[in-house]
Amino acid sequence: MTISISRPVSNTSENDSKTAKVRESLSTRKAISQIIRERVIAAGDPFFANDSIAHHISDTEREELKKEIEGKLQGVFDSLIIDTANDHNTKETARRVAKMYVDEVFKGRYHPMPKVTDFPNAKELDEIYTLGPITVRSACSHHFVPIVGQAWIGIVPSDRVIGISKFNRIVDWVMSRPHIQEEAAIMVADTIENLIKPKGLAFVIKAQHMCMTWRGVKEPETKMVNSIVRGSFRHDPHMKKEFFDLIRAHGFGDS
Ligand SMILES: Nc1nc2c(ncn2[C@@H]2O[C@H](COP(=O)(O)OP(=O)(O)OP(=O)(O)O)[C@@H](O)[C@H]2O)c(=O)[nH]1
């Protein structure tokens, strides 16, 4: 008796060519960071560490970008000779750090600005109001370690006002990028100015840089303070003084 066993017919040369095509497309497919970078360059937009590139990235691409960053960070941990395959503490660290960069500490680069509703300045208020302290969290561009501090805002409104919580949201969004403090202050001031075009705008930031406390000179006390004054705060010394007196009364200068 002859028993015949039927097997699926395997067309080896056809399969080989399919595999080759998949390999080729994987090897020639651009990394998502490259696709986004080319888009940003084509638009003529800057992409320094403290620039937002959120408007060039879709939600799906952001997820893909995190995967790419995770792979690259894994390479860093491999080069640091950490046994991430067996060390229960660092097994998922590449994924965690990629997510932390894109969705949390640097979300001001990859996520759009929070929605800000503005209202008419119905009573035509043209006195100073101040807001603070606003907790500031950022990271320095030089070492990628935290900058932590406080900020105060002074406004003399024109015809539009925004809800006060939106100032905290804007500060958080702008600061959530790698920065140097001087440029961060200018960027926050520019963002607020573009939104409500106030008659006067003051922004003061006081922060401690972990690149100076945790490493380097290891100086635990030094804080950097810088201020931006525009419009009526710049032209009128009495208004400027009133602003600084007001924020001093609300904690600026206490430590
Ligand atoms: N102007 C300014 N400098 C900053 C800021 N954040 C960090 N720095 C400083 O940037 C400098 C970078 O200096 P480098 O000499 O390139 O780096 P480094 O050799 O690691 O320097 P050290 O920190 O002195 O060890 C350091 O002195 C930091 O203290 C900031 O927001 N503004």
Image (cartoon, helix red, strand yellow):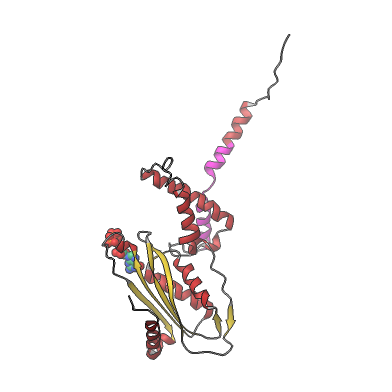
Q: Which residues are magenta?
A: 21-43
Q: Is residue 103 above or below residue 253?
A: above
Residue 5's spot in the image, x, y percent?
A: 70, 18
In this view, which residue lies farthest toward the front? Answer: 88
For ligand 1, the image quadrant comes to bottom left
- The C terminus, quarter of image: bottom left
In this view, which residue lies farthest toward the right? Answer: 1
Indicate whether residue 32 is drawn in magenta: yes
Residue located 45% across and 45% down the image:
91
Q: Is residue 254 above or below residue 122?
A: above
Q: Describe residue 146's horizontal placement relative to residue 164 as left or right.
A: left
- What main secondary structure does the magenta stretch of the protein show? helix
- Rendered image quadrant of residue 148: bottom left
Q: Describe residue 2's horizontal placement relative to residue 59 as left or right.
A: right
Residue 250's spot in the image, x, y percent?
A: 40, 81
- State the residue in front, 254 or 139: 254
- The N terminus, quarter of image: top right
- State the residue in front, 87 or 185: 87
Residue 205's spot in the image, x, y percent?
A: 39, 74
